[in-house]
Image (cartoon, rainbow, N blue to C red):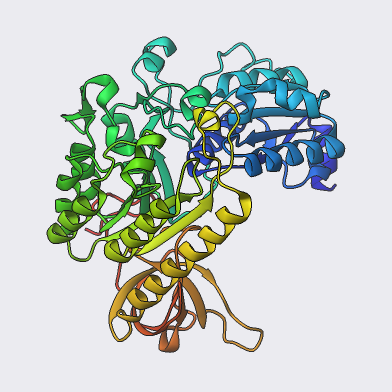
Amino acid sequence: MTNEVAAVQSGVKKVGFISLGCPKALVDSERILTQLRVEGYEVAASYEGADAVIVNTCGFITPAIEESLSAIGEALDATGKVIVTGCLGERPEKIMERHPKVAAITGSEAVDDVMGHVRELLPLEQDAFTGLLPVAAPGMRADVPAREVTKHGDVFAPTVKLTPRHYAYVKVAEGCNHTCAFCIIPKLRGLQVSRDAGAVLYEAFRLVAGGTKELMIIAQDTSAYGVDVRYRESEFQGEQVRAHLTDLAVKLGEMGAWVRMHYVYPYPHVDRIVELMAQGKILPYLDVPLQHASPRILKLMRRPGAGKQLETIRRWREICPELVIRSTFIVGFPGETEEDFQELLTFLEEARLDRVGAFAYSDVEEADANRLPGAVADDVKQARLARFMEVAQRISTEKLGEKVGGVMEVIIDEFNDDEDDQPGTRLIGRTKGDAPGIDGQVYVYAGEFAGQVKIGDIVRVRIEDSDEYDLFGEVVERPVWAPNVPQLGHFPKH
């Protein structure tokens, strides 16, 4: 009997899943998938095996909205039963205008609502022995009412991962308190709600115990973690820990995994985080969304800390010289003059950021920036973007060239063998200065370690060459990874 026939005869319902958008949305997808598994649904690997499809959408910028609407249409054509969730779900009229036949629409962070619609669309046969038991979210304690958990800002840690085993995103807060002129995240996801530090740390502990070697800490504004709950304390392994980024980073750093900080705004207390990096407690990497360098444009954008970025970056590098800084920028924002743009290029030359992304400004529906005067022509935007990226690429080439001849730790993400290679001869990985999917890679020749290095291993690589964004080298050592967390399935020798 085939698996498909067996599934039909046993009443198993299969749900397809499409996850779009940023890592924060990816964590939401993991939570929904976890709950699907908890309640007895299976996840379909393709449209052909799906009884219905959930599409977790992005609704931030126009290209992302179009991608989401296209994915919804494709899923509708394939299955006829589609539940839409995520950021674009906060604007149901836009979805219904294009796809009036969707079964249901929910907003972001709506696991319960999504599951309610799944149960309506695909009711499961009730088991005589377990059918009367209440459905609980994974990780929920029976003695704690759900309203109390929600009030305390916790989101249940997912047990289904959409990332490889060796790295994971850990969301510490949802929503944002900023009013940036180009952004509608507060309208889509609400104001900031931070998780208790204990909840975050127990999730991280479980991940590292299961073999995760890299934890990427994310939020809309990671630096503001805990502000909304007044940095209240919660329990972790018998002690009280504040919901504050520095306290959290200290505890995460004690677990022995790589800890990478994303979406960090340049608040004063980030200096303490950089000190932890200098001490080797967490990775010397900061993802800081600066957006521009002209004080005038930053004020129009309503960005915090306008005009102080260069001073802050210099101070951070004095504390931790090996610090790698990634940032993103917008060119062609309404009102941007050639003088403003030249100020941005000058900043780029002086700051010499390690990893840089940029995009040309485009209107975001409902964003305040749409009403600003001085719209920049599309051809000017694209020309400025090209000039900006030319400078950024040159700086990246120079900085990577300085690493040639050195030895760096590299975490292996995938194999890259040719047909004629011995298996495991060629590998692709990342240094401590590279986040997955957005930064550079290291193309590695395993040499005498061919066939011994596995995906997820952290190896030492001699860097032999570089280009604009990537490094090339050969494995010289395969050290044993030994975190400070007991590994599941491994027992101490007596």
Q: How many marks?
A: 0
Taking depth in this image into account, of 468 and 302 the one nearest to the observer is 302
The residue lying at 35 percent from left, 34 percent from top is 172
377 sits to left or right of 137: right
The image quadrant that residue 124 belongs to is top right
51 sits to left or right of 179: right
Is residue 487 at all visible to an observer of this figure? Answer: yes
377 sits to left or right of 412: right
The image quadrant that residue 370 belongs to is top right
The image quadrant that residue 446 belongs to is bottom left
Q: Is residue 111 above or below residue 275?
A: above
Taking depth in this image into account, of 325 and 390 the one nearest to the observer is 390
The residue lying at 45 percent from left, 72 percent from top is 469
44 sits to left or right of 33: right
Q: Is residue 213 above or below residue 399?
A: above
Q: Tell me residue 127's x, y (percent).
A: 69, 19
Q: Is residue 344 above or below residue 136?
A: below
Q: Tell me residue 384's x, y (percent).
A: 51, 59
Is residue 122 at all visible to an observer of this figure? Answer: no
Taking depth in this image into account, of 330 and 35 the one nearest to the observer is 330
Q: Tell me residue 417's x, y (percent).
A: 59, 80
Q: Tell me residue 429's x, y (percent).
A: 45, 69
